[in-house]
Image: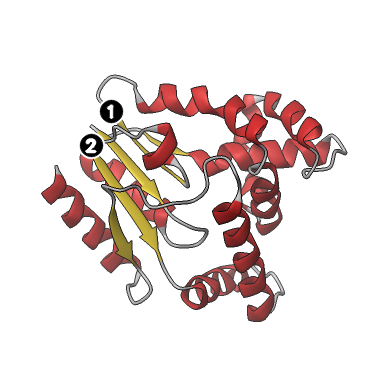
């Protein structure tokens, strides 16, 4: 069984994907982490993430980089959004994600093009979304909890910019697959969102 979980930044798709993987006892891949690693490697190389040549070169990042806690930072998220617009980068990471999805027994993958590009044949497709205001507040509180000084306005501006890049890129833009179930988590807390996703997945299964 393949479960595809797509959605914009800070919508809760990662949390939901992990919960679904645990519930159905399936391996999980946060595909966004791959793009964060490319962005981070590009930065370490002194390259420009907006340069397709530099971004493609960074796709050869070492496996050990995936364990770098810096990949979970807001900066890494921004870099990932920048490198992900390059078609060459997306093609370079395609097979890696595709292989994970097609492993025996199935898997859960979350990202922005899982149900539309990586695993269009997924048995269950969820598109997790939330308003920019709700997502910005969640990310703002999360960053505050980690001692990072940032304004709610700046977080909202950054999320809006990422949304624009994800929606407008020419290759594999963020989109709702035709057969996906849309789950809006704007008014849901963490546990409610997970419960709703498991219920939806259970019915679709």
Foreground tag (1 vs 2): 2
Foreground of the two, 98 or 26 = 98
* Residue matched to label 1: 106
Image height of 202 relative to 59, above or below: below
Q: Residues within 10 Å of mark 1 (few under 14, many from 20)?
A: some
Which label's residue is closer to the chain start, 1 or 2? 1
Name the element at disc 2.
loop
Residue 140, located in which quarter of the rendered image?
A: bottom right
Quadrant including the N terminus: top left
| In the depicted structure, whether residue 64 falls above or below residue 198 | above
**Can you give x and y, in whole percent of width and height, for residue 10 in the image?**
50, 62
Q: CA distance from mark 1 to mark 2?
A: 10 Å
Marks 1 and 2: CB-CB under 8 Å? yes
Q: How far across and how far down the image is residue 136, in percent?
A: 55, 73
Q: How many marks?
A: 2
Q: Nearer the viewer, residue 67 or 140?
A: 140
Tag shown at residue 25: none
Q: Which SS class for mark 1?
A: loop
Left or right placement of residue 161 versus residue 200 in this view: right
| Residue 190 percent coordinates (x, y) | 35, 66
Q: Depth check: 145 or 9 in front?
A: 9
Left or right of 13 on screen, residue 199? left
Residue at screen point 65% across, 64% down = 161
Q: Is residue 132 above or below residue 6?
A: below
Q: How is the image coloured?
A: secondary structure
**In the rendering, at what x and y percent does residue 151 appear?**
68, 79
Residue named by callout 2: 123
**31 left or right, relative to 23:** right
Left or right side of 124 for 99: right
Residue lying at the far right of the rendered structure: 46
User: Is 200 or 149 nearer to us in this picture?
Assistant: 200
């Amino acid at each position: 069984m393949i479960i595809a979980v797509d959605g914009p930044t800070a919508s809760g798709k990662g949390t939901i994907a992990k919960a679904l993987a645990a519930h159905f006892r399936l391996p999980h891949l946060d595909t966004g982490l791959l793009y964060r690693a490319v962005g981070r490697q590009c930065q370490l190389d002194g390259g420009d993430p907006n340069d397709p040549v530099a971004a493609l070169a960074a796709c050869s990042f070492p496996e050990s980089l995936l364990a770098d806690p810096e990949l979970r930072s807001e900066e890494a998220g921004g870099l990932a959004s920048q490198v992900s617009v390059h078609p060459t980068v997306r093609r370079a990471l395609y097979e890696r994600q595709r292989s994970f999805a097609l492993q025996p027994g199935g898997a859960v993958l979350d990202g922005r093009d899982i149900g539309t590009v990586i695993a269009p044949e997924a048995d269950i497709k969820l598109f997790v979304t939330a308003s920019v205001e709700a997502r910005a507040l969640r990310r703002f509180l999360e960053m505050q909890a980690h001692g990072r000084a940032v304004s709610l306005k700046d977080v909202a501006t950054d999320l809006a910019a990422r949304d624009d890049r994800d929606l407008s890129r020419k290759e594999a833009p963020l989109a709702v697959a035709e057969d996906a179930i849309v789950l809006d988590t704007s008014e849901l807390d963490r546990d409610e969102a997970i419960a709703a996703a498991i219920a939806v997945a259970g019915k679709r299964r």
